[in-house]
Amino acid sequence: MNVGIYIYDNAEVLDFSGPFEVFSTAARVSKNQDQLRVYLIGESGETVVARAGFKVIPDYSINNHPALDLLVVVGGVHTGEMEKNNVMAWIKQQCAQVALTATVCTGIFLLAKASDLSNTKVTTHREDVPDLRQQFPELDVLENTRWVDAGNVVSSGGISAGIDMSLYLVERLYSRDLAEKTARQMEYDWHKTS
């Protein structure tokens, strides 16, 4: 399984590093790293400057990455990304190809703009719920929940909620046992219910 995490300038660091740690730790704990591979993907493949100046070099660009099974779109200062036609087209294309798409925090704004999520149950950071409802009234936006599983779209609240959601995805895609072992290896107190 190939997991691609889309990152961009001013992305929230824990929004991408948390899920990256979960999936890479799950691969290590399962003792079959070829079974689960996780990649950071940027628009160009050049250095991304995330929140607070945290610099990251993506593994791939949106033009040269391996085929994905799971796409994770992260949050941060997302408004500029929403104006990039090539990024929106890429997210739309990936949503049509991958088995599952997940978002952390305001990553749901990017996904909602790129693809039709009418009547889909979603969530985001509690401070962004009013804006999400205003910009995308066709969504069924839930509050006070760490993540929402709507079938082929799973969305989470902000920052640490993305770690909980990622552990849930390990459980959904593999097993509860692997998710629990991953959380223990990370010394993370997993909120198992959304």
Image (spheres, helix red, strand yellow):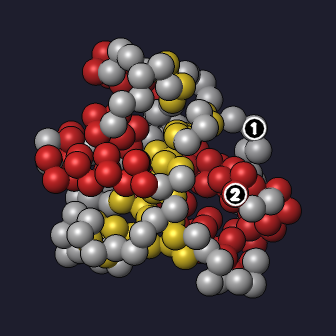
The residue carrying pointer 1 sits among few (fewer than 14), some (14 to 19) or many (20 or more) residues within 10 Å by Cα, namely: few
| Residue farthest to the right, as pictured | 177
Q: In the image, is 108 to the left or to the right of 175?
A: left
Residue 183's spot in the image, x, y percent?
Answer: 74, 63
124 left or right, relative to 76 = right
Where's the N terminus, which quadrant?
bottom right
Q: Is residue 166 left or right of residue 153?
A: right
Q: Tell me the kind of residue under disc 2.
A: Leu
Residue corresponding to mark 2: 173
Residue 23 drawn at (x, y percent): 60, 67
From this view, report whether residue 134 is shown above or below residue 112. above
Which residue lies at the image location 60% right of the left edge and 24% below the top edge?
Answer: 144
Task: Measure the alpha-carbon separation of dots 1 and 2.
Answer: 16 Å
Of residues 145 and 60, the one nearer the viewer is 60
Q: What element carries label 2?
A: helix
Q: Is residue 2 visible?
A: yes
- Which percent across, then down, holds residue 61? 26, 71
**Amino acid type, label 1:** Thr
Q: Name the residue under label 1.
A: 193
**Residue contact between numbered discs 1 and 2, judged by CB atoms under 8 Å:** no
Name of the residue lying farthest toward the front: 97
| Circle number at residue 95 | none
User: Does residue 49 appear anywhere in the picture?
Assistant: no
In which quadrant of the rendered view does residue 188 lie?
bottom right
Q: As rendered, which of 80 and 118 lies closer to the eye? A: 118
